[in-house]
Image (cartoon, helix red, strand yellow):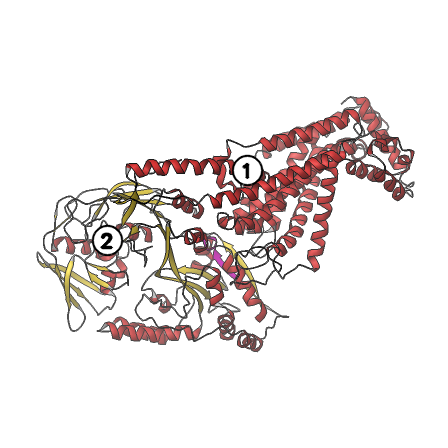
Amino acid sequence: MPTNSGAYGENDATDSKATGNNENETAANVAGSSANVSDNATNTGSTGANANHDAEAKNTGSTDETLNAHVKGTSVGNVSGGTGGHGKKKGWTWAIVAAVVVVALIAAFVVIRNNRKASIAPAQVHTADSVTIGLKLAPTNLDIRNQSGSSLDQVLVGNVYEGLVARDSQNKVVPGLAKSWEKSADGMSYTFHLNRGMNFSNGDKLDASDVAWSINELVAKHYHDSEALMNFKSVTATDADTVKLDLTAPYANLLWELACRPGLVFDKNANYDMKTQAVGSGPYTVAKFVPNDSITLKANPKYWGTHKAATSTIVLRYFGDDNAAVNALKSGDVQVLAPVTENLAEPFVKDNANYRVAAGDDTDKFVLAMNSKGAKTSDLRVRQAIRYAIDHKQLIASRGGADKPLGGPIPSLDPGYQDLTGLYPHNVEKAKALMKEAGYTPDHPLELRLTYANTYGTELGDQLRSQLKPIGIDLKVNVVEFSTWLQDVLKNKDYDLSMVDHNESHDFSQWTQDSYYYNYSNQKVKDYYNQAMAASSDSQRDALLAKAARVVSEDAPADWLFNYRITTAMKSGVSGFPLNLNQTLLPLYNVRYMTQVK
Amino acid sequence: MTSKDECSTTDTNQASRESTNMSQDIVSSVGNSVIQPSGKVFKSTKARSSNKLTVVLRSIWQRGEGKFALIVLALWVAVSLVSLVWTPQSLWATDGYHVWAKPSAAHWLGTDGTGADVFSWLMAGARTNLFIAILAVVFAGALGILLMGAMVSRNSALSNVSVVAVDALISIPTALIALILAVPMGASVAVIIIACGIGYGLNLARIARPQALLAANSDYVASSLSYGASGFSVMLHHILPNAMPTIMVQLSLSAGTAVLAESGLTYLGVGVPSGVPSWGHSLATSVKFINVYPLTVLWPGLIVTVVVVALNVFGDVLRDAIDPVTNPELREV
């Protein structure tokens, strides 16, 4: 059994180990008896029944050996004797062995399920000084200026590095290193007033010169996301606490972009290897980094601000395999798991005395793109029919029910959101009529390919095939490697239908780019978007974006299957863990784990 | 095995060819032997009048594990055929509001992650797996016999090269062949069949070679050749019949491994494509949820296990039944 990595107080740790051991033994026995079946079924190591492999060593083979001995025995007997006299007895033995295996399997599951009811005697409350969090996507290195991937933003932004401004759990811009700012009337000049007495974790002072240097470096060296600072002209430190940023033209998303990577402030005097180390001004420092495995954060003793770390050590562990992640939470190796597949979280939902499961809003859009210039999908009627035919509520229900319907390209946490689900309500009759008009019926169906990456599972493709069958579409589902999707769909635009999770926030601009894989082009959308970006106020920007989004949705270049919401499962006793947006923005300073000690 | 045994094998073979037209009594003799206590069957005089296939089948049926294997295999074929015309629910009837349902009257084995009927998918999966197993075995058999012929060829250049080639190629895992094939072909049933065919064909050739070599070096082959028989004729009439018991057993085991390979390769994403029912597909789509919904993994797992055990047992029993040395009844035919 893996040690509890110091997540508990001493008393608690020994206690949990004792119960843990018991559990493990039962699990080992169970795995032993089931191992025979799973081994027979999976010589090639294919089914997940092998999840119990490490436990199986103790008991393996007892039944297997009997079987082998049995088979050998009969063949030898027959060779020498030449008569099949034992026939009936052998048949019975076979039946009994099979029955025993089946009963053992079923008993195993029952035992496992019942075993979950471990009771803890309540006593005093103790706040753990270490919390372990299970995440999914691991960063390959810590170089946030060059390495792409939202996993880096998740760990570092707000925890280790801080930006000129920050964003809150509603995706709104809030003060960061700058306590306030002003925008000029023409929207082309911003003045930021910084907090006083700020410093980096190495003790260096943080002032306006660091801010200006960081942004200038970003633009000059084309660091990752530098292109997000559109219309950038210059940034200067007018004095130690004031920074002035000038644009060549107004850009309504500027502040939000500065809350992400482009606004991060680095120490201009520090010299360190950004791939493995991090010197920032946030409440945490990186104590240990193991690529693709874990990151250990320790509270920054020199932290200057108000977001002081509540827990001194936070370990982030990465699980590529969903079941391994769920097992880690069950065994207590991690106290929080984000994200967890909703259907997999069911045991935690049931065990609400020990666990809490909650979903948070996010900007993930599951986009079923329909190639607007495809040979078959260029017909608007076909695309509209597909949107009418898809039963979004059913898709969401089958995934567990946490996700939200989404009728257009802008999710609720982004500017310009408007409920567009009424544009194409679920209406099979209307879909059939449109398909008939286009020349297709269930007897003469239209054959379409749906290409998507295997990371999303097979269920969605299977459901879409079923839902589109009655309106006269024969959907061929190609579940491919993500790299194949990138090549065929994103790069070569060789697809009819494609499905992908566009998780980026503020990404409406993709509908204004003719070269993007959607093959979508509408001048009206581009005009609205450009006006929105030049808008002087947020409300004006939001109204224009909403208009643009409506036009896009009406043109049906895609169907938005749902707005995916992140499900997080945690031990009861964990508090302060952000639920919204936690795959890109995960401020950890407030995370606490309270345990009850005897 | 001594060369005397070899002679008897060929002898019975010729005898069986002569007696193939005497098969009118098959039905009655099978009926008799099933009813009779198994120990007495071999003494039955009626056995003389049945042909080889009947004797083999009857010998298999007389053994308990043989019965088990035959029943399972017959069920497999029957279910496959039925699934072509009927399944309890349509495969495409998905219901997002009732996913991962427990077994009920409407869904005998519950529903999967899309709300489709697990039992119907397993029924339909039976035919895909049967198709794969049969074609893989046919392909492996053809390739294996061809290579075996080359390995025991009188042309020493050909035999030496083919021995080395088989030894070299046999070191490539079947899964790797499938992964390579999947690059141009994508996930498809053909990938499984070709990969299994190549992998098991090579194995077959190597395992059957010693048997074939014994026959090839025997006196009766030498005399056949001295009478002017062609290499092909010797292969067909002497070498192949001698190697047949080994080949049959090996092919039966290969069928079992092909069923396993289908599950494994489908799980890896290079096997059966999405939308084609197969046991591997049922396993692969539910295995992620084994902690939460173990039953949906149990059913396909159990079926694969039972079928593979049946095929392996069948191979074992078949070896004893098909070889005149171990099955005296066969010598009387």
Q: Which residue is mark 2?
A: A158
**Residue A202, x across and y down, in percent:** 15, 43
**Residue A436, x across and y down, in percent:** 58, 76
Q: What amino acid is at disc 2?
A: Gly
Q: Which residue is mark 1?
A: A35
Residue at figure coordinates x 18%, y 58% from the top left: A176
The question of residue A98 being in magenta is answered with no
Badge 2 sits on which subunit? Answer: A
Q: Secondary structure at mark 2?
A: loop
Locate the C terminus of chain B and report the quarter of the image it occupies.
top right
Mark yes or no: residue B266 visible.
Answer: yes
Magenta residues (range): A449-457
The question of residue A453 being in magenta is answered with yes
Badge 1 sits on which subunit? Answer: A
**Residue A187 drawn above or below residue A83:** below
When asked about the image quadrant of residue B209, the answer is: top right
Residue at figure coordinates x 48%, y 38% from the top left: A27
